[in-house]
Image: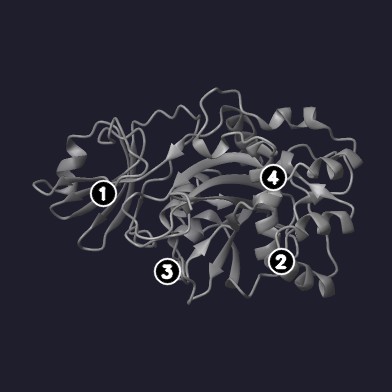
Amino acid sequence: MGAWRESASLIIAVRHAQKCIRSSFANFQYNYNLLCMKRQQNARFQPSMYVFPGGEIHPSDADLKWHNIFSTFGIDANSFTSLYPKTSVRPQIFKFKPNELPREVSLRITAIRETFEESGILICRQSQETNDFGWANYVKIPENDIRDWQERVHNDAKEFYTLCENFNCYPDLWSLYEWSNWLTPTYFVGRRFDTAFYLACISNIPQTVYDVTEMEGLKWDMPGNLLTSPDVTLPPPQQYEIGRLAKFESIDNLLDFAIERSKKGVLLSLPVKIELQDGRVYVLPGDSMYPKHVNLLEKQVINKTDITIRELRDISPVKNRMEYSNLQVKEICVKNLVSVEGHLAPLQLKNISTATISKNPKL
């Protein structure tokens, strides 16, 4: 078993039926919802927390036999070219392995498979022809069949290939856009996860049926509401990413941004903890206090207990961090950050409903 497990997660944004709805968050008016799944309260990881659908990559997701399904629709290996970002710098999770599909393909299959297993949404196409450039498509499965297929895929990931054969469809890889890559911090005890996050936009709300073996519910809501609702607890990566999404009131603008930004690829986000006099801060790449050399395996905690969170801010020209004070004040602080990935900084948020990062989440 490696130091961590590799996984993929899918952020799904869906346009509202109404033109625009005002969020309880500031004065933002969003025309889309995001999908979050609520994990079982007795789950080993992230109990009762709201997460994006996703899970571990399975060898069947990288099986070369997927070429058989794609070729049925006239899709050859050259069609995967557009999935590769225009950069030579790639995180470890995308490292190519012999006799497997490229990771840019297999991780998307993982995200789509896990999304179906957990929510019943099948991000697939039944025809190569499309007039909805950039938007994700989904295949409707009869309601009386969907739970059976979810169970089959849950019990055996290879059944996802069988599902696609049965419904004459193929995974809609090209509507998933690279969004971010998070690695569980080194000081966590137990399982760590290296997770590729993707974004997909859907033009209308699909039928959803959540997997009762892993989830106790699901929630469609606007980004601003998810950030501020007292009933929604988000792990740090989800909170940070929704903070980014919350800057987009229009799903059309979000989709345009995702398409262009994904061409630059993503870089690894590994939080590093700084212990302070009045709490702790988790710095991310780009922050002035982020170590120049980070070991992905060895525990790394910076001791600054002689100063406060505020004093650390004052000596940090560039901030990209999550702050947790001993008074239970939680805040995301990003300032003067220039992203080489072409990403936006998340909204500045305080007293957010975020799970403590000291526990072991499934990113």
| Residue at which label 4 appears | 62
The kind of residue tagged 4 is Ala
| Residue at which label 2 appears | 208
Residue in the picture at 33% in, 59% down? 351
Distance from the alpha carbon under mark 2 to that under mark 1: 37 Å
- Residue 160 image position (x, y, % from top left): 76, 57
Number of residues whose C-alpha sits closer than 10 Å to that of mark 4, classed few (under 14), some (14–19) or many (20 or more) = many
- Residue 265 image position (x, y, % from top left): 56, 31
Mark 2: secondary structure: loop
Which callout, 1 or 4, points to the residue nearer the camera?
A: 4
238 shown above or below 149: above
The kind of residue tagged 2 is Thr
| Residue at which label 3 appears | 230
Which is nearer the N-term, disc 4 or disc 3? 4
The kind of residue tagged 1 is Val
Distance from the alpha carbon under mark 4 to that under mark 3: 40 Å
Which is nearer the N-term, disc 2 or disc 4? 4
Mark 1 and mark 2 in contact (Cβ < 8 Å)?
no
Residue in the picture at 36% in, 36% down? 285
| Residue at which label 1 appears | 281
The kind of residue tagged 3 is Pro
Number of residues whose C-alpha sits closer than 10 Å to that of mark 1, classed few (under 14), some (14–19) or many (20 or more) = many
171 shown above or below 150: above
Distance from the alpha carbon under mark 2 to that under mark 4: 26 Å
Distance from the alpha carbon under mark 3 to that under mark 2: 24 Å
Which is nearer the N-term, disc 1 or disc 3? 3
- Residue 8 image position (x, y, % from top left): 58, 49
Mark 4 and mark 2 in contact (Cβ < 8 Å)?
no
Which is nearer the N-term, disc 2 or disc 1? 2
Residue lying furthest left:
306
Number of residues whose C-alpha sits closer than 10 Å to that of mark 3, classed few (under 14), some (14–19) or many (20 or more) = few
